[in-house]
Image (spheres, rainbow, N blue to C red):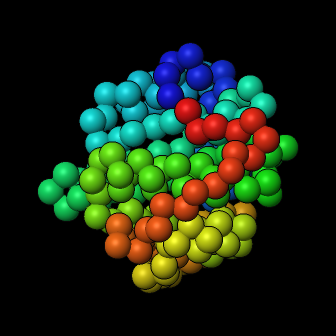
Amino acid sequence: LTLDHTDDFHRWVENKESVKYSLSAFSLNRDRDWIRAYIKSLLKNEKTWDRVIVCDRRNIGYCGLSDVSPNNRSAEFYILIGDDEFWGKGIGTRAGYEVLNYGFSQVGLHRIWLTVSSLNIGAIRSYKKQGYIEEGVMREAAFRDGVFHDKIIMAILKSEWHNKSMQPIANTTAD
């Protein structure tokens, strides 16, 4: 992820359905200056590893690891596919596998975790397919569309990771 992705990122967060269960900061109307400042903050953060998801030569989202802790050998996984034309095609699952492989094989992590909205059934299914296990629930931790809902905490340990070997989906790569 670089400042060259500012326009793509702006397009992703303008799609309110794509950010519905993402960071609450994305649910507000954000201009390109805010996006540029957000990307700059990620680039300065040594505890974050960000990658753009590219499909059919289009930047469709981003994913990576945040809060990388060398002492605890853990990090938080995140993903946003901002281009809804590519939802439901297994791209998020594939990107997740790539991040898990990087985190466990290259960074030497022991644990990768995430939180997901209890209403985001597709994401939960994807995370389970990747090997994540539910660890707990943060009750009514998110407020969307006028309603509180739970966030589920999920994690996978390196010992549970089986380095899934997958064939590429169309021309999909996680750059």
Left or right: residue 26 compared with residue 133: right
Residue 79 visible in the shown view: no
The residue shown at (29%, 42%) is 47
The number of numbered badges drawn on the structure is 0
Instruction: Name the residue at 38% across, 28% down.
Output: 43
Which sits in the foreground, 142 or 167? Answer: 167
Q: Residue at x 27, y 36 (%)?
A: 46
In the image, residue 129 sits, relative to residue 92, either above or below, namely below
Q: Nearer the viewer, residue 25 or 65?
A: 65
Q: Residue furthest top?
A: 4
Q: Nearer the viewer, residue 117 or 100?
A: 100
Looking at the picture, does residue 121 appear above or below residue 44?
below
Residue 100 visible in the shown view: yes
Q: Position of residue 61 (x, y in %)?
A: 64, 39
Looking at the image, the residue that sits furthest to the right is: 85
Apparent side of residue 101 relative to residue 9 in the rendered image (left or right): left
Q: Position of residue 160 (x, y in %)?
A: 41, 74
Q: Is residue 24 above or below residue 7?
A: below
Residue 125: image quadrant is bottom right
Left or right: 66 as drawn, with respect to 15: left
Q: What residue lies at 63% left-to-right and 30% top-to-bottom?
A: 9
Q: Is residue 27 left or right of residue 164?
A: right
Quarter placement of the C terminus: top right
Residue 112 in percent (x, y) is at 38, 62
- Closer to the camera in the image, 138 or 43: 43
Q: Is residue 161 above or below residue 29?
A: below
**Residue 136 placement (x, y as % from top left):** 44, 83
